Image (cartoon, grey):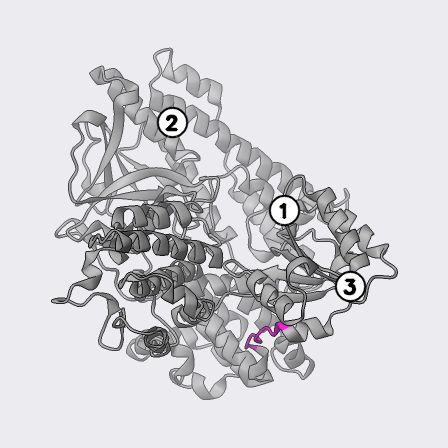
Amino acid sequence: MTIKIEQAEGRSPQEELEFFIKGNLSLEKSTRKKPFDWLGNQGWEDIVKLAELFPPQFGSLPDDVEKNSTEWKSWYDLDAPEQAPYPMKYQENLSAFQKLLLLRCFRVDRVYRAGTDYVTVTMGEKYVQPPVINFDAIHEQSTPFSPIVFILSPGSDPATDLMKLAERSGFEGNKFKFLAMGQGQEKVALQLLEMAVSRGQWLMLQNCHLLVKWLKDLEKSLEMITKPNPNFRLWVTTNPITDFPIGILQKSLKVVTEPPNGLKLNMRATYSKISRETLASCPHPAFRSLVYVLAFFHAVVQERRKYGKIGWNVPYDFNESDFSVSMEILNTYLTKAHNQEDSDIPWGSLKYLIGEVMYGGRAIDSFDRRILTVYMDEYLGDFLFYTFRQFNFFSNKDVTYKIPQNGPESSYTDEIENLPMANTPEVLGLNSNAEIGYYTQAAKDMWSHLIDLQPQTGDSGGGISRDEFISQVAQDIQNKLPQLYDIDVICKKFGTDISPTSVVLLQELERFNKLVVCMQRSLFELQRALSGEVGMSSELDEVARALFNGHIPAIWKKLAPDTLKSLGNWMIHFKRRYEQYSYWVEKGEPKVMWLSGLHIPESYLTALVQTACRKNGWPLDLSTLYTEVTQYRSEDEISDKPGQGCYVSGLYLEGADWDMENGCLVKSQPKVLVVELPILKVIPIEASRLRLQNTLRTPVYTTSLRRNAMSVGLVFEADLFTTMHLSHWVLRGVCLCLNSD
């Protein structure tokens, strides 16, 4: 909105907006070399492109950066460079929006905050602050004909607030009907609706996104209501989904609910819902302190979501019901211990029921469950009440998160009020860099939404039409496509006695051929469609749009290994894959395998175990892999393949750094999210002979998206040596990825 208003007044031209949301899309890397290591590769490409596109403001930018590196580096190293003066002449000479373009080149992670500041300065603060939801005001605005639709965000549940509203409005008990939607509930819902309309009741249908098809029936039923009882109200809750019926949305009041942001607001909201009676109901002296610990734990698991995949592999909707049931469990067990005059608190049972059943019951990913188990071990135990050493959840020079002295309810709420409004990721056990990852992702999401909102016709900037631009990119890629592999010839070369790894190679080549054929066909058809020889199908239109925006077309993505790369970087990756396959075909298995270049890397690792089992006569089902990190940084240092197993390269470590001297995990450097791991040695072994100490079982994923709810994305588990306690790295979400984005 802000940019459109600015454009109407002649500021922020379209070319600047295009660069802001897409950056440098060219498939070729610039000839000018990156002068400093502290600059990102993509950042330098963007700087060169910016100078090329807008010479009056940025023409001398690459030279300025090279000649005044100290000034630029000190600005780049600031925590919030967008709030400090920009280096050299750029503070005075640039408009507010042009400063965003410059920031994009250096610090993508600050673009989101800078964008918020830009809107605030241009439009006013009320456009960036979410309003507080007032349920009474919503009720006043509603009518019997307009349903109230709550669009949920994870961790928020309006049901409790609605019940309180119903009590205040005199709709408690029988006048307020609830139904959680799911299979087989369709008829019940329509019967309840009919009854509520005639009797003037309130009806709440929860989780309507689970029955999208049935919502069409609901839409028809709502249209047929002509004379409802004036007291009737329909409340609907749903996750944001694309195919929610427009008819219901148009006539409804839409309310977006969000859970409170930050530990302090989260704990404040939790405590506001605990009654005095509940806190006084348990006679055990430790009960109130443990409710505080539970509230802190509840806030922490919800806050971790904010940091994306480094927080949880699968985002979970931990909500109030988890907390309230866990509090009941605490109450029951502590009351029992108190009545039996047992001085020991049953920690084992509490940890299991809260960590494994209540919260762990939602966690479907084994590594997420490991995080919950570690939190339970860190937050529950006799150490909470040691007098010789006070327990802190977290403390640094500025703030200490501790359990207040046992006392009335006010001593706990006062402690919450004294907490800082914003908390650093370290309080949750995460790395201080986690925030950078979160804001970088937020900026990328903002750009992808802005790209979707752009007109899909007209100029591409730079004076050539959209069709010409797409045609150029397509031609460029066509020229780079390799010849297909002749699999029959390669098969004959291997002969009859074929090793497991050669079988993997043949399967890989087959898949690579399919991808090349698909690329050739779609690019050839697209060129014909652009010149008007054939009609533009929806599939070709998708390819054209992807090439225009610098993305990988969906039909290619299906046939290639998972990736988050832009089109230009993906083409470099594609070329390197071809080179590795060709080397393997002509000269035999590479001495160091680049796992990211394989379509299904798991199959190659399984083949290694099979080879070792054949050679040593081990049973296959009792054999496994373990890993060692070597001292080698590059392939040139390695003379030959190991006797068993293999060397693999191209692994990226997230959430920690690697100490080459001591060969162990260490804390990440500030602002360095991902580091390349030295070459890893993968060794097959009989499971019964494996004895590892002080090593972290580290998941290896294909991309930084880690794995999804269907557990797609996990390749294998590596063993990384550590001198610190394992819980330190588990909470930091340490993992390895085969691709840097």
* Quarter location, residue 2: bottom right
Q: Which span of residues is magenta-colored?
A: 128-135
- Disc 1 marks which amino acid? Leu
Amino acid on which the number 3 mark rests in the picture: Lys
- Please give the residue where the numbered disc 2 appears in the rendered image: 585
Name which residue lies at 40% across and 42% down. 576
Q: CA distance from mark 1 to mark 3?
A: 21 Å
Name the residue carrying label 3.
251
470 left or right, relative to 381: right
x and y percentages locating residue 526 in the rendered image: 67, 44
Q: Where residue 537 sits in the image (x, y, percent)?
A: 73, 43
Q: Earlier in the sequence, mark 1 or mark 2?
A: 1
* Residue bearing the label numbered 1: 210
Q: Nearer the viewer, residue 424 or 93?
A: 424
> Callout 3 environment at 10 Å: few (<14), some (14 to 19), or many (20+)?
few
Q: Earlier in the sequence, mark 2 or mark 3?
A: 3
Q: Residue at x 29, y 20 (%)?
A: 620
In the rendered image of this protein, does residue 668 appear above or below residue 11? above
* Residue at 26 percent of width and 31 percent of height: 625
Tell me the distance, in whole angstroms, between the alpha carbons under discs 2 and 3: 64 Å
Q: Residue at x 54, y 71 (%)?
A: 53
Q: Quadrant of residue 222?
A: bottom right
Residue 27: within the magenta?
Answer: no
